[in-house]
Amino acid sequence: MARHDGPMTSEAIARMLGTNAVVVRRTMAGLRDAGYVRSEKGHGGGWTIAADLGTVSLLDVHRAVGGPRILAIGNEDPASSCAVEKVVNAVVEDALREAEALLFARLGAVSLAELARGFDTYCRP
């Protein structure tokens, strides 16, 4: 969107991403609520960027559209009575917390402006 002139419709974004326009609208709603994009209805309307890309990180985007968890793996049975499982779960949970903290730190350090520059590098003729 940062390299597109004018608003982009949900349908155009969906085609670009290979998904459904409803999914795009749902995702963009979270970004709109966070103030990162805005939408205009009607002919010639669509989604536009509303924030300075240098001030928005990947972590900000995750928080706007994702959720509290970023890793989908974890303890399957936190109430297990098996001592071995309890010990293993504790170690795995510690490792997952450390990995998540590292990932959050890295995502927080990458701005959308950096991604746009990377896009420019790959897409220049």
Image (tube, rainbow, N blue to C red):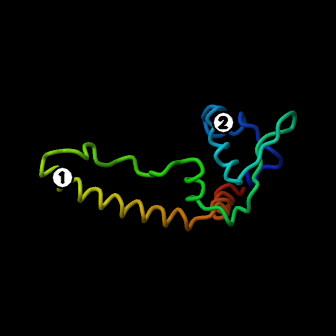
Q: Residue at (12%, 52%) from the top-left corner?
A: 84
Mark 2 — residue? 14
Q: Position of residue 32 (x, y in %)?
A: 70, 48
Q: Residue furthest left?
A: 83
Sequence-wise, which precedes: disc 1 or disc 2? 2
SS state under label 2:
helix
Disc 1 vs disc 2: which is toward the camera? 1
Q: Quadrant of the C terminus?
A: bottom right
Would residue 75 appear left or right of 62 to someone viewing this image?
Answer: left
- The image's mark for residue 86 is 1
> Which residue type does callout 2 highlight?
Ala
Residue 2 position in % (x across, y down): 74, 54
**Disc 1 to disc 2, C-alpha distance:** 44 Å
- Residue at 58% across, 47% down: 65
Left/right placement of residue 94 relative to residue 19 reads: left
Residue beneath the point at 19% across and 44% down:
80
